[in-house]
Amino acid sequence: MTISSSLNAGVAGLASNASRLATISDNIANSSTNGYKRAATEFHSMVINSSRGTYSAGGVRVTTMRLIDQAGALKPTNNPTDLAVRGRGFLPVTQESSLISATADFPMLLTTTGSFRTDANGILKTSTGLVLLGWPANPDGTIPPLPRDTQAGLVPVQIQTNQFAAEPTTAITLGVNLPASETEVGSTGAALPLSVEYFDNLGTSQSINVTYTPTVPVPPVTGLSNTWTMVLRDSAQGNAVVGEYTLVFDDTRTAGGTLASVTAGATGGAYNAATGSFSIAAAGGPLEITVGRIGDGSVMTQLSDSFAPTAITKDGFPVGNMTSVEVDANGFVRANFDTGITRTLYQIPLVDVPNPNGLFAFDNQTYGLSNQSGSFFLWNAGDGPTGDVVSFALEESAVDVAGELTSLIQTQRAYSSNAKVIQTVDEMLQETTNIKR
């Protein structure tokens, strides 16, 4: 019984070290595989109790596990859709074959890195067929509220590289200096024109045509009136008047040249003294026109004898072509256009589970949920316990080759020692057989 248990223990040792050798060889083979997580082997003794004062060798058992929570170093790349997770969390992906089935019920897999590129349909996927998943943005770039404990809101990230985009103008700032001398007795009273371009809802160029007409005092009144009539016309409505305002400027020593009052006429919205703006009804919708607050000389002024636009600004952009795609640290996928527009297309959440090492390991450095991993939750990247998303980067293998080679030497010695035990037991059994002679 004792000799045979020694033989069994030696055989168990050989099998256990063979398993350890398999994990070491797998680790070394994948030492250059991006996102590879090291496999580890642990030995556990087996104890067989005997009541007759003899000892029976129980041998050894082996368990293997993949250390998914151990991250590799990040290496830079030149592709903006090469993504890696820095910190805790996983990127949601699915297999390309799941999309071919034309069903929305595709399985969600997890990975920590991937080199994603668009295919013929604009879908971001890796060369091994892993498709990136994300939440689609609304037309205004916001992400709708979606459940975080289910994958129901996730869809394949699809980017049409030949798409166009435009952004309508909603606000214009009219920073102008009006010549104070034009409001003096004897001036011509000629209107001063100004045209400001804006973009309608279809990205077409339109203009707001503004005229500033000074109020010239009539003798015997002397001095300056410091008063102007501002009329705004919309080219998209056949130059119809969309705003009419009376501007009065201050001529005191402390606030000379700044607005003293703004009064709306028959057309146009009321002047908001808190924001220094008013709204006009353009063809495509309301436009917010800013002329400055009362007493503020940073927007519209009346100084000296020079008429000059000083700060004409507006939002909105004409139709433009998409030039590039980028993914920021919070997982927002944004498209950049040659007109300066940046549109948010998707948000890529990070998936977190209580026990990452309990996940099922699959091909291509992907993982699946299990009872041991616990239920998942979708976090915004950089929020909660999760890390952030790094673009232009891939995660290297988590394998330390030097450590694996050291373990290889130890395993070889242990395997040889167990083989020696079996050889010794064989010789002892041979001696036992020879007793009969």
Image: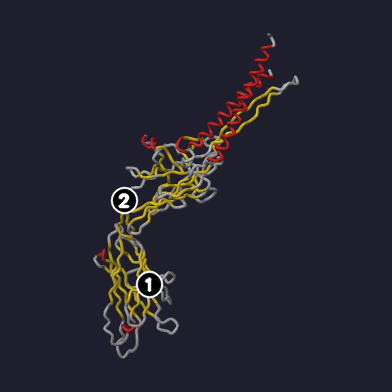
Res 291 label? 1
Residue 186 left/right relative to 151: left
Q: Is residue 373 visible?
A: no
Q: Residue at x 36, y 57 (%)?
A: 341
- Does 379 appear above or below 373? below
- Does 426 appear above or below 373? above
Residues tagged 1 and 2 counted as in contact (Cβ below 8 A): no
Image coords of residue 383 (percent x, y): 52, 51
Identify the coloring.
secondary structure
Mark nearest the camera among 1 and 2 is 2
Residue closest to the far left: 238
Q: Is residue 166 visible?
A: yes
**Label 1 Cα neighbours within 10 Å, binned few <14 / some 14-19 / many ≥20:** many
Q: Residue at x 30, y 61 (%)?
A: 199
Image coords of residue 292 (percent x, y): 40, 72
Q: Residue at x 31, y 54 (%)?
A: 321
Viewer-nearest residue: 259 or 62: 62
**Label 2 Cα neighbours within 10 Å, binned few <14 / some 14-19 / many ≥20:** few
- Quadrant containing the C terminus is top right
- Assign a secondary structure to mark 1: loop
Viewer-nearest residue: 433 or 166: 433
Viewer-nearest residue: 214 or 31: 31
- Assign a secondary structure to mark 2: loop
Residue closest to the far top: 437
Image coords of residue 175 (percent x, y): 36, 72
- Quadrant containing the N terminus is top right
Image coords of residue 338 (percent x, y): 32, 57
C-alpha distance separating marks 1 and 2: 36 Å
Residue located beneath label 2 in the image: 163
Res 73 label? none
Residue 147 left/right relative to 314: right
Residue 174 left/right relative to 424: left
